[in-house]
Image (tube, rainbow, N blue to C red):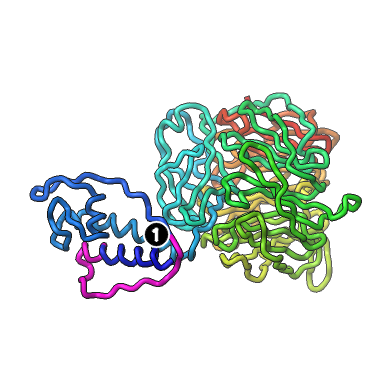
């Protein structure tokens, strides 16, 4: 530790001396903030000087750190070559020292939340700047396009901007977006991702006849488990969590088993042991005869779609209804937050797929916490939580039917501030749609008006409400769009750019009036939506949920309807 701290101290001192900012007699001190660190990689740049001849910026950096000579010229404040690159020296050193000072020993695990901007581009449109939003970003972070790093600018802990190459968008495709923070700690955004569609906007949405799989009934999540840039599916497979490898043409297989599954609870994924491969965490019962989740079980992935048993930990009874995975204490190790009736529980990760003892938080309400979302809702780069409360609310000390939304601001150390209710919707018709209640998709997040601030969409018994975020943890009053005129809540919805115009849309499965419809509300890009359009009808409904993604990588979003008899994959043609 002392050696690395001494190197950082010496490097900073030499850089300052070389640039004439301090003299050799001034004492420079450094606060011990890390045991080790990695300086950014330095790429030499050649310079020509009329008196000194040619030399590289790398030579001058060596000069700055070691007091060596550059082309036989002593390194001091009169050396113009050193002055030429002094900003580069200080920038490289400042990045490393700032990261250490801000986060201690490790960089946090980055998290992508919401869509990247733009969500879609036309093929052949050339190079462009991609904005990626989320939390836990640090200087030196890199945005990856299909696992290839792209030149990245750190804007804030909430935003990065990357330069996407013209060759990346030469033809119809899907760009799989991830973020990597520098070592130590850091690593890939394993619990989150985004996609950018490369396709010209379409005016007519046409989907294939659905392909049914006896898979993904109650729980289904899409991500890339085997590092090929193609979305795979993890979900319920009988009494197990299974994995279907995406083949790149919208079909899935071969299949593998990750571990036992307890329906209808949800599950989470991420790299919990730091080996670069995605793992799965899921609730399990202590007794196979009792369908009550009491434990959390980690299944360790090998990066090829296979899993082996990992650690298990005891959870609080009835506290495993929903999962949020992220680095909530910013120590470079993935954590978990689970939700149950009237409480949430935090499990801070140790980085080896084990977790510290549970810490529980209660939120002051009557009713069940129906859903939980994690994201940076106030723009400070730390992960916050939003909870959905239904089917009962407390009004003037009386319990009434309804739905409420609560905001828990993250402190960045694994704790949260006191829950704050920011929206209440009383009445028996206010709580979520039927499909949303089954699959914990009452609430969705996106950026509906393209301002880089997270917005919310939620469902009640007849409508989808859209609340635009102010970027400070507050939201504007909702605008409503009718999805079920019967008021029975017989619908499920998801969010995605289904027509590749770069604007998020509302994608809905309606199953009222003895008919099943696949409809969309196309987004205008300003937070409002057009009248609904019917895509197809007479199909199985998404009673238990919906999952979206470009599963055949053709630049057009595909949709999966989940039902209690399996899943139905609709590919755009």
- Does residue 442 show up? no
- Does residue 540 show up? yes
> What type of secondary structure mainly makes up the magenta span?
loop
Residue 217 lies, in percent from the top left, at: 79, 39
Residue 445 lies, in percent from the top left, at: 63, 50
Q: In which quarter of the image is the C terminus?
A: top right
**Picture residue at 52% right of the left edge, 36% below the top:** 175
Residue 107 vs 448, above or below: the answer is: below
Q: Quadrant of residue 221?
A: top right
Q: Which residue lies furthest to the left in this view?
A: 51
Q: Mark 1 points at which residue?
A: 96
- Decide which of 415, 511 is in the foreground and name it: 415
The question of residue 399 being in magenta is answered with: no
Q: Give the range drawn in magenta.
A: 15-36
The 10 Å Cα crowd at callout 1, few under 14, some 14 to 19, many 20 or more, is some
The question of residue 28 being in magenta is answered with: yes
**Picture residue at 58% right of the left edge, 67% below the top:** 413
Left or right: 188, with 166 as reference point: right
- Decide which of 303, 155 is in the foreground and name it: 303
Q: In which quarter of the image is the N terminus?
A: bottom left
Q: What element carries label 1?
A: helix
């Amino acid at each position: 530790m002392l050696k690395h701290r001494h190197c950082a101290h010496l490097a900073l001192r030499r850089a300052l001396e070389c640039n004439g900012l301090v003299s050799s007699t001034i004492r420079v001190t450094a606060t011990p903030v890390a045991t080790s660190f990695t300086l950014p990689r330095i790429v030499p740049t050649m310079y020509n000087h009329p008196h000194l001849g040619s030399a590289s910026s790398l030579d001058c950096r060596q000069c700055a750190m070691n007091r060596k000579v550059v082309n036989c010229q002593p390194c001091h404040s009169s050396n113009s070559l050193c002055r030429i690159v002094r900003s580069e020296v200080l920038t490289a050193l400042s990045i490393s020292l700032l990261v250490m000072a801000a986060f201690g020993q490790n960089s946090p695990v980055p998290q992508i939340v919401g869509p990247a901007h733009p969500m879609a581009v036309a093929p052949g449109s050339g190079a462009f700047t991609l904005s990626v939003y989320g939390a836990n970003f640090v200087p030196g972070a890199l945005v990856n396009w299909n696992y290839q790093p792209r030149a990245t600018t750190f804007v804030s802990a909430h935003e990065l901007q990357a330069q996407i190459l013209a060759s990346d968008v030469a033809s119809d495709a899907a760009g799989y977006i991830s973020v990597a923070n520098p070592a130590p700690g850091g690593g890939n955004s394993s619990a989150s991702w985004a996609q950018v569609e490369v396709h010209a906007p379409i005016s007519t949405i046409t989907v294939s006849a659905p392909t049914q799989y006896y898979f993904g009934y109650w729980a289904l999540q899409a991500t890339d488990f085997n590092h090929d840039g193609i979305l795979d599916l993890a979900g319920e497979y009988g009494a197990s969590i299974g994995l279907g490898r995406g083949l790149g043409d919208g079909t899935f297989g071969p299949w593998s088993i990750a571990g036992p599954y307890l329906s209808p609870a949800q599950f989470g994924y991420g790299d919990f042991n730091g080996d670069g491969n995605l793992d799965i965490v899921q609730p399990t019962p202590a007794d196979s005869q009792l369908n009550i989740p009491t434990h959390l079980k980690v299944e360790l992935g090998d990066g090829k779609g296979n899993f082996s048993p990992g650690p298990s930990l005891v959870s609080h009874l009835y506290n495993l209804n929903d999962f949020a995975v992220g680095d909530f204490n910013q120590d470079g190790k993935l954590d978990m937050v689970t939700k149950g009736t009237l409480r949430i529980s935090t499990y801070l990760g140790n980085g080896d797929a084990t977790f510290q003892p549970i810490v529980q938080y209660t939120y002051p309400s009557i009713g069940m916490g129906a859903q939980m979302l994690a994201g940076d809702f106030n723009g400070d780069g730390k992960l916050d939580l939003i909870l959905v409360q239904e089917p009962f609310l407390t009004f003037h000390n009386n319990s009434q039917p309804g739905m409420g939304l609560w905001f828990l601001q993250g402190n960045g150390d694994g704790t949260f501030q006191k829950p704050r209710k920011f929206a209440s919707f009383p009445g028996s018709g206010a709580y979520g749609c039927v499909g949303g209640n089954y699959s914990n998709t009452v609430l969705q997040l996106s950026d509906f008006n393209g301002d880089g601030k997270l917005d919310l969409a939620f469902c009640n018994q007849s409508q989808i409400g859209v609340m635009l975020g102010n970027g400070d943890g507050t939201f504007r009053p909702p605008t409503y769009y009718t999805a079920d005129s019967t008021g029975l809540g017989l619908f499920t919805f998801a969010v995605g750019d289904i027509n590749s115009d770069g604007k998020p849309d509302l994608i809905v499965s309606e199953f009222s009036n003895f008919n099943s419809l696949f409809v969309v509300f196309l987004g205008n890009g300003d937070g409002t939506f057009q009248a609904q359009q019917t895509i197809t009808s007479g199909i199985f409904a998404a009673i238990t949920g919906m999952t979206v993604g470009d599963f055949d990588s053709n630049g057009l979003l595909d949709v999966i309807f989940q039902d209690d008899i399996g899943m139905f994959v609709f590919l755009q043609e």
